[in-house]
Image (tube, rainbow, N blue to C red):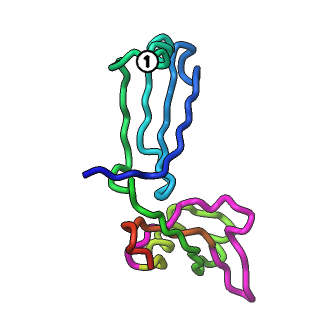
Amino acid sequence: MKEVLDGKITITRGRHSEDEVSITIRDVDSRRDFLNIKMRLADFSRALLNEARIPCSLETRDMDKVGKIKKEIPLIFECGLTLYINSNIQALNKLAEEAAKEGYKPSTYYGSKNSFFQVGKKHYARTTQCKYVNRGEEE
């Protein structure tokens, strides 16, 4: 089966070694970097000159999400004063899991200045929750 996806490519040099080129491929819809290609700079130059089958290393990840649409919605939940003040990430993550909609995975990021807020005497945390859906199955 052949499928055409919208993607983005990033080519960097010298991150781990001056002699290395890293090429990262991103699926636009799922917002996942799913393929990282590493090769020597000399081999990359040979590839640019139309030489075929140049050696490289491939690292894949999140292949189950590639080609899907990332659906992300806000998640707000009551966290209590202690968590509000201390930002206990493990306890916050547990509460977020309980508050998330079925099928959604909550983010573990609480670093925004708006991640915590108070309404009256109640304290809340704000993050996001997401799931990956097949094209055409978006709600």
Which residue range is magenta in the image?
102-125
- Front residue of this view, candidates 12 and 99: 12
Name above or below for residue 31 compared with residue 87: above
Left of 84 or right of it: where is 62? Answer: left
Residue name at image x 36 percent, y 25 percent: 57
Residue name at image x 41 percent, y 39 percent: 35
Residue furthest bottom as drawn? 120
- Residue 47 picture location, percent across and down: 44, 18
Name above or below for residue 135 compared with residue 33: below
- Residue 117 picture location, percent across and down: 72, 75
Residue name at image x 48 percent, y 79 percent: 99
- Residue 71 picture location, percent across and down: 49, 69
- Residue 65 picture location, percent across and down: 38, 56
Which quadrant would the C terminus be assigned to in this image? Answer: bottom left
Name above or below for residue 19 compared with residue 13: above
Q: Secondary structure at mark 1?
A: loop
Residue furthest left as drawn? 1
Left of 112 or right of it: where is 40? Answer: left
**Label 1, on which residue?**
50
- Front residue of this view, candidates 91 and 109: 109
